[in-house]
Image (tube, rainbow, N blue to C red):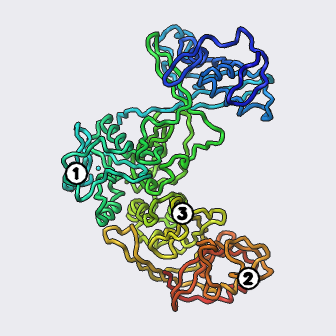
Amino acid sequence: MNPPAAPFGPLDAPPLNNDTSQEGSLVAFGEGKLCAKCFAMTGSQEGLKTFLNDGYEHYRPPELQESATTGCQVCKTFLSGFLEFRENRSGIVNWETRLVVRSPVDEDQKPSESIGGSEMSLLSGVKLRSLRAEWIKSNGQEQPQEFGIVASPIALAEKHHNYLVECSTSTLAFVYESPIKGTKADYVTLSYCWGEKQELLTTKENLSDHLEEIPKHRLPETIANAVDLCRALGVRYLWVDSLCILQDDDEEKLVEIGNMSSICQSSTFTIIATSAEKVSDGFLGGNQIDIRLPLYIDQSTLGTIQLAVERWWDTGASYNQPGFRRAWMFQEYLLPPRALVFNSSQVLLKCQGISDGALTPILDTNIKFYVGIELLPRSVFGVSSSQGEEEKEDDQEKQFTTWKSIMFNYSRRNLSCFNDRLPALAGVATVLGKVWGDNYLAGLWEKTITQQLGWYRPLHRSELLINLSAADKSSGPSWSWATLPYPVHMYTAVKPAAKLIHAEVELVSSNSPYGPVKRASITLEALIIRAKNLPEPKKRRYNLPANVLPESKWTHHFTYMDYLPTDYCPDIERCRLIYLGTLSDPDGIFMIVEKQLIGIYRRVGLHRHYPGSVCRDDIMAGGKKQLVVLE
C-alpha cells in the first residue's frame, strides 16, 4: 500500500517493505514524539556509537513519510529537507535515496572501538557540534543538510553608576552610591529592545519606593531574565536604562546618554538580548529549536540534543535578529569589552581579549552568525595592536574608513523616535573623539569632514526607516546624514577640493557634547557652479525631476537627492554645485545645495559626474572658488 498523504504534498511512493516499516509505536520525548528509529539513533548506546563513527542509516523516504504522518517530529523535519533538496522539483522522487545521519566530528575525536563497551567513555573527547543528514542517491552523489546544535543558556566561570539594581538579595531594590574616584562596582549592563511601552519605569515620583523595593513580578520578561542571569552567575548589580535613569527627567537622560560609553565599558560584561523583539518577549528559553533528540549518557541517564535546521536561505546575518535592527543596540554592541550575545539559537561571547572582540560561540554549535560590523579601534579599550606596535588611530585615512563603516551600518537601524539619531550613537562618538583628538560636528568629524560630505541616499534604497515618515527630520543641519530618515552610503573623494574654514555647533545640552544639536553650520571654501550649467547626459540615472538639470548630449552621471521628488523638489534657479573633489576614477563629486539667504545654503543632494576632458574643462570654467555657509 502507498503511504498516507502527508503535509508535504502527495508522493507517488512504492510499497513499503515489511522489514523496513515502523519499528514500534511513538515514544514521548520532551514536548514532542519520536519514532523508535529516531529515538535509538542517539538515545541508545549502540545507536550513538554508530552515529558518531560511520553514521546512522535512517529510513528511506517512504518510511520517513509514514513515520512523519504518524507524528514523529524528527522524521517530519528530515522528510521536509529531502523534498527541498530532491533532484527534481517537479515532484519525481528518487526512492532509492538513503538517509545517513552523522555528527561531523574530527577524525581524531571519534570514539575508539576499544572503548565502545564503556558507557562512561563513549563521549570522551567528542564535540557534538552538529548533526549532518546526508541524502545518498542511487548514483552515489550526496546532498547534505546541516542541523546546528542550539545552545541553552549556561553559567560561565568567567565598572560604576549612581543607580544599580541589587540582584543578590531576595528582594530587588536600588542601591545608590556616590561615585568615589578609583572605585568600581561589579555590575552587568543590559542591552535590549524596548519595542513597546514599559509600565515599570523609574521616575522622580517613585524613586524613593524603588530605593526600598522594585517589584520583580512587574518586571517585563527581558529584564526579569537579566536579573535571573545575574543571580545565576553571581553578579550582584544590574544596570538597565528603564530603571536606572529617571525617565521623566530630560536633562538627566541627556547626561546618562552621554555617559553610555563609560557605563558599558566599566561593566563586568553586557547582556545583549538580540532575539527579543520587545521587552516582554524575554531572551531565555525562546530559542529556535526545530527538533529535540535524546542523548545517551548511561543506562539510567538521558540528556537532550536541541537542533536548529540550517535553511538554505539563511545566511546567518545579524539583521535576522531583532536587536541588530535597532539603532540603540548598535553602540551597546560595540562599546563593551565583554558581552554575552543571546540570539535565537545560541549564546555567543564577545571579548576584546579573545579574537579581538569577534563573536565566539559558547558551545561549538555549527550555526552561522555573521554580524558584519567593523569593531572599534583596539586603542579604545586601551589595547595595543596584536603585532605589538601602537596603532596610529590619528591617521586620517583610517579614521575616515572607520566612520564610513559606522555610518553605513548604523544608518540602516530603526528608531522609534528619530530625534534619537545622534543620541543613540553618542557613546561611540565619545570614545572615538578621545582616541582621535577630533571635534565632532553633528555626526561628522572636523579633520575629514570634506570627505564625509560625500554621503548620499542610494538610488535603490528609497525605503524609509521603520516607524518613520518622509516628513521626519531630526533637529540638525542639512549637511549631516543624521538629519534624514534614510540609510546612507558614501563616495570617497581621493583628492578633496573643498576646505573647511569654520564650524559652529549649538548643542541641546552642554552635558551631552556628542548628542542632539539645535543648529549647526559650516563654512567651506570651494568651487561653486550653477546647477543649470551642468550638462544633461545621454543616459540619465538619478532620482531628480527632469526639469532640474538642462539637456545635453554629453556623458552620463548620477544625481542623488536627499529626499524623493514627491517629498521635496528644489528650485533649479537657486541650486548650486559645490565641488568636493575627485574619486579614484577620477570622477567628480559635487554637493547640491539650494540658496536660502544671501551666502547661506542648505544641502539637497549629491551629484557624481563622469567627465570627458572637454566636458570637465567647460564645467570647471563656469565656476569660481568662494566661501559658502551651509546650515
Position of residue 559 measured from the top left corner of the image (x, y, whole percent): 67, 74
In the image, residue 402 lies at what x, y percent? Answer: 51, 60
What element does badge 3 sit on?
helix
Residue mark closest to the camera, 3 vs 2: 2
Q: Which residue is at 80% across, 80% downward?
A: 553
Q: Which residue position is annotated with label 2?
A: 535
Q: Earlier in the sequence, mark 1 or mark 2?
A: 1
Q: Residues within 10 Å of mark 3 (few under 14, many from 20)?
A: many
Q: Amino acid at mark 2?
A: Pro
Name the element at disc 1. Answer: loop
Question: Callout 3, which amino acid?
Answer: Lys
Q: CA distance from mark 3 to mark 2?
A: 30 Å
The disc, 3 or 2, on the residue closer to the chain's N-terminal end is 3
Q: Which quadrant, please, contains the N terminus?
A: top right
Q: Which circle marks residue 183 in the picture?
A: 1
Q: Is residue 147 above or below residue 254?
A: above
Say which residue appears at 47% left-offset and 57% top-offset: 327
Dot label at residue 404: 3
Observer-side mark, 1 or 2, equals 2
What mark, if any, has residue 525 been given in the picture?
A: none
> x and y percent of residue 569 in the render?
62, 79
Is residue 180 visible in the rendered image? The answer is no
Alpha-carbon span between mark 1 and mark 2: 65 Å
Q: Secondary structure at mark 2?
A: loop
Left/right of residue 249 with respect to residue 396 in the rendered view: left
